Amino acid sequence: MNILVFGPNGSGKGTQGAIVQKKYNMPHIESGAIFRQNIGGGTELGKAAKEYIDRGDLVPDDITIPMILDRLKEDDCKTGWLLDGFPRNKVQAETLAKALAEAGINLDYVIEIILDRDIAKLRITGRRLCVNDNNHPNHIAFDAIKPVEKDGKMVCRVCGGELKTRPDDQDDGAIDKRHDIYYDDNTGTMAAVNYFKQLEGPKVISVDGTPSIGEVSEAIMSQL
Ligand code: AMP
């Protein structure tokens, strides 16, 4: 099963992706997480991407597109994948669709989490990243995924690992820029969403991102 998941930053896209990934045991390929791992590891890719990410800009397509297309060729993707954070603009969408068609790979589902921009922004600043596993969602404002306290410190609710905030989640300008890109239906991410929605083939699952994590996940799972 091959799935694309879309949603503005703060919509719970990563959290929902982690739930689907766990249930179907498929690789959860998150473009932003790959960049952050490379930044953490001090790689050339990380160095090239960092300034864009810190500002909330997209990393240029000539870096991002090959990175994702190469990742999809790895062995663990042969039986299915969940792609999260890519495509982020119309060019990426068209390039991905072409690459999949050429490789004879079907896209089965397009999941779209719909959320008002103001709510998405409010949600961003409360999320926390587990240093051990990107698929351990933590958020200080949601009981279902609230970090736990250990020795006077808030730690990951899943593994007790250290929690970090993302620099681009604490920067108002970077948050706004990411949302400008997401909600742009001309060349931005909404243009990519609409591109995939009009293709024949994939089933589109559009869900409201405002209810609880469990309710959103139920809405997605019942249609997968
Ligand atoms: P995310 O974790 O999805 O919020 O992504 C964090 C940052 O990584 C974004 O603000 C971009 O700078 C960069 N990024 C992630 N995915 C892409 C993409 N598909 N194209 C370009 N830049 C990306």
Image (tube, rainbow, N blue to C red):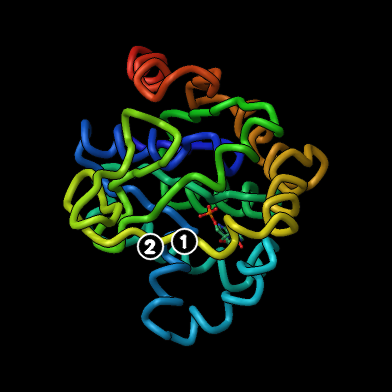
Name the residue tied to disc 2. Answer: 71
Distance in Å between CA atoms under marks 1 and 2: 5 Å
**140 or 36: nearer the viewer:** 140
Looking at numbered disc 2 in the image, what kind of residue is underneath it?
Answer: Arg
Q: Are marks 1 and 2 in contact (CB under 8 Å)?
A: yes
Query: Which residue appears at 21% of the width and 31% of the height?
Result: 23
Looking at numbered disc 1 in the image, what kind of residue is underneath it?
Answer: Ile
Quadrant where ligand 1 appears:
bottom right
Query: Which residue appears at 47% of the width and 35% of the height?
Result: 12
Which quadrant of the figure has residue 81? Answer: top left
Which quadrant of the figure has residue 206? Answer: top right
Under 8 Å from ligand 1: the CB of mark 1?
yes
Name the residue tied to disc 1. Answer: 68
**102 or 155: nearer the viewer:** 155
Residue 27 in picture, x, y percent from top left: 28, 49
Q: Is residue 78 above or below residue 66?
A: above
Query: Which residue appears at 35% of the width and 29% of the height?
Result: 143
Mark 1, other Cα within 10 Å: few <14 / some 14–19 / many ≥20: some
Query: Which residue appears at 59% of the width and 61% of the height?
Result: 168
Quadrant (top left/top right/bottom left/bottom right) for the N terminus: top left
Mark 2, other Cα within 10 Å: few <14 / some 14–19 / many ≥20: some
Q: Judge left or right: residue 166 versus residue 94.
A: left
